[in-house]
């Protein structure tokens, strides 16, 4: 028996959530799944297997929502490796750390955007749309 083809429209944005807080992953998943043009394709609780997970996914996620502070492998190091090996999988860092120096570190590590966990949920959805469309999303300078 042949596997059925993915019935998800090609325009659906595939999002992978990575956060060590299960409640945050669940909230992100619900938020993404409530958008008709998006689908959560998985959740990880650390960056330890992020690169391997993306490597093994078919099709790969368009956008990864990545918490910046988690135990295990440094999330920014994982993001940098991911950007080098799979540039089509674009990462948005979601964090409560939103100082200019930290945002610069995210940019230098290959991030496509930054979304504050203290912001409105719609801002994360908007950032996913922008990054999936090939546009960077960075906080406005003060």
Image (tube, helix red, strand yellow):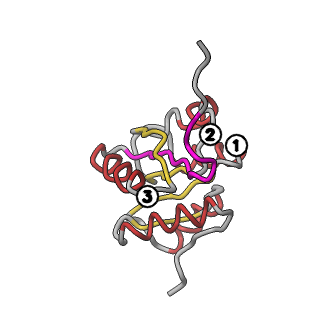
Q: Which residue is mark 2?
A: 60
Report how far apart the C-alphas of labels 3 and 2 lie in the structure.
19 Å
9 drawn magenta: yes
The circle drawn on residue 86 is 1
User: Residue drawn 38% across and 55% down?
Assistant: 34
> Measured from the top left, where is residue 4 in percent x and y?
58, 26
The circle drawn on residue 35 is 3
Count of numbered marks: 3
> Measured from the top left, where is residue 84 in percent x and y?
72, 46
Task: Assess whether mark 2 and mark 1 are in contact (beta carbons under 8 angstroms).
Answer: yes
Mark 3, Cα crowd under 10 Å, few <14 / some 14-19 / many 20+, is few
Q: Give the residues drawn in magenta, as a range.
A: 6-19
Residue 50 image-quadrant placement:
top right
Of tags 1 and 3, which is closer to the observer?
3
120 drawn magenta: no
Residue 71 image-quadrant placement:
top left
User: Residue drawn 46% across and 56% down?
Assistant: 36
Mark 2, Cα crowd under 10 Å, few <14 / some 14-19 / many 20+, is some
Is 139 in front, or is 33? 33
């Amino acid at each position: 028996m042949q596997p059925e083809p993915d019935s998800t429209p090609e325009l659906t944005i595939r999002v992978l959530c990575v956060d060590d807080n299960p409640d945050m992953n669940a909230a992100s998943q619900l938020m993404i799944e409530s958008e008709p043009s998006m689908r959560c394709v998985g959740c990880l609780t650390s960056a330890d297997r992020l690169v391997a997970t993306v490597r093994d996914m078919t099709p790969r996620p368009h956008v990864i929502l990545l918490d910046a502070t988690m135990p295990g492998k440094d999330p920014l190091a994982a993001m940098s490796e991911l950007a080098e090996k799979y540039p089509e999988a674009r990462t948005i860092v979601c964090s409560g750390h939103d100082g200019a120096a930290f945002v610069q570190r995210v940019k230098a590590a290959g991030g496509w955007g930054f979304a504050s966990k203290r912001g409105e949920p719609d801002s994360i959805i908007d950032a996913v749309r922008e990054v999936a469309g090939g546009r960077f999303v960075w906080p406005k300078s003060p």
